[in-house]
Amino acid sequence: MATTTASLQELAKNHLWLHFSRMGDFQDGAEIPIIVRGEGCHVWDEHGNRYFDGLSALFCVNIGHGRADVAQAGARQAEELGFFTNWSYAHPRAIELAARIADLAPGDLNRVFFTSGGGEAVESALKLARQYHKLTGNPNKTKVIAREVAYHGTTLGALSATGITALRAPFEPFTPGGCHVPNTNQYRLRPGYGPEMLADAVAERIEFEGPETVAAVIMEPVQNAGGCFTPPEGYFQRIREICDEYDVLMISDEVICSWGRLGEWFGAQRYGYQPDLITTAKGITSAYAPLGAVIASDRVAEPFLEGKNAFLHGFTFAGHPIACAVALANIDVMEHERVIENVREHEPAFRAMLDSLRDIPIVGDVRGAGYFQAIELVKDQETKETFDDDESEWLLREFLSGELFRRGLICRADDRGDPVIQLSPPLIAQPEHFEEIEGVLRPVLEAAAARIRG
């Protein structure tokens, strides 16, 4: 099959269904961006144009592009054992990876249930929480508490926890039991609502629903949707106390926030709390192979290890030998090349660069942690007035997204909450890369501000 630029475009438009994309945008002659090569923090399209990957593809290429050594680990595994299932069987790479994850995870999170990706990990954790409570004599504990605007996945179960109305509406009705509380957007706290009240809102919601009906609380260490909401001091410690008080499992959704993204192996370690379950994916292989996992505490695993009990759940390709081999090689790179230490060392410089953009009139807030940061855009810095839907459509989709990409920067322009620009570079990024980001971001934001004033 011919793979010239023209034929790739034609084939893509005729046959490829892009995820979360307005396919109609490409029916009037507009090109689909086709990325053909990557090296380090950069990728190239089919025309030879070079881009800084300011989103690590989708928060996941943590060690950077072009690591043939990591890919080769998968090829070597394929020569030995291309595939065997984890349904009643095991293979060496899954065993080795599970043990290594348990060694890195906080506290007694010692049991690893593999999935094929992040959405499957969240779905698995929600099902695990329900069955756990049934096995421990609390069959009515089925509800899950999540936060407003939070994104936890696209399966029908995960959508019940996802707190974004626009993503939920097309697929309703779905699994019942999703309940929501305020998120930790401290830039836009409700009037009279102090940061210390945010965690207690979880206890109030559990009381409202009935503690005998609530199975789990699920939260990201830093919430992605809405733009990198960080927790106030003591927030997760109070959530832990609430979960213990009401016999509710605490799920730390770390599909993005694990594997160094926040400067620690796991986001729970950054903020000093001990969850019952961690969901993870993305950076576990730096996206060189699809893999996810639920990491469970000894307490949660215990009833499943007794008698004839079993977690009645699984996926064909979960814990695939090739993916596990890649994950092991990825962790080797992170340890030997001190990737996490790089994030810790250079986070202040990354944040300082973003904070320097506050002199641009439309930059309202800068927030995040590690190499996971966001800029909220506003019409008025003083009043924090945001953009209406039409203005946001023009700002993010008609101007910023295209102009940033045209100038060589891949990032996310998002308005699932208020309009934000998200930046999540590969964890190998250095201060010179932050200068490269600023060299594109500043003039584009200044141009947007000038147009808005005009």
Image (cartoon, rainbow, N blue to C red):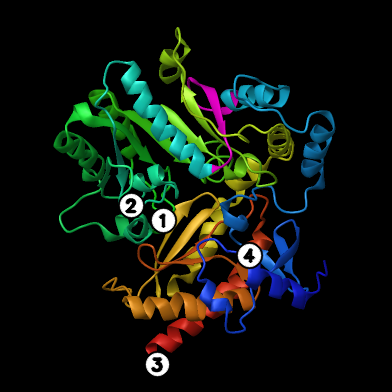
What amino acid is found at the position of numbered circle 1 in the picture?
Ala
Closer to the chain start, of discs 3 and 1, is 1
Closer to the chain start, of discs 4 and 3, is 4
Q: Secondary structure at mark 1?
A: loop
Closer to the chain start, of discs 3 and 2, is 2
390 on left or right of 105: left
Q: Give how far apart the Cα atoms at labels 3 and 1 are.
A: 30 Å
21 on left or right of 144: right
Closer to the chain start, of discs 4 and 2, is 4
Closer to the chain start, of discs 1 and 2, is 2
Q: Give how far apart the Cα atoms at labels 4 and 1 are.
A: 26 Å
Q: Residue at x 44, y 88 (%)?
A: 451
Q: Residue at x 39, y 76 (%)?
A: 392
What amino acid is found at the position of numbered circle 2 in the picture?
Gly
Where residue 323 appears, as percent x and y from the top left, is 69, 37
Of the pair 262 and 57, the residue shown nearer to us: 57
What amino acid is found at the position of numbered circle 3 in the picture?
Gly
Choose mark 4 or mark 2, whichever is in front: 4
Dot 4: few (<14), some (14–19), or many (≥20) neighbours within 10 Å?
Answer: few
- The residue that mark 3 highlights is 454
Choose mark 1 or mark 2, whichever is in front: 2
- The residue that mark 4 highlights is 16
What amino acid is found at the position of numbered circle 4 in the picture?
Leu
Q: Secondary structure at mark 3?
A: loop
- The residue that mark 1 highlights is 225
Dot 1: few (<14), some (14–19), or many (≥20) neighbours within 10 Å?
Answer: many
Where residue 82 appears, as percent x and y from the top left, is 77, 33
240 on left or right of 155: left
What residue span does the magenta drawing correspond to? 103-117
- The residue that mark 2 highlights is 163
Q: Is residue 135 above or below residue 361?
A: above
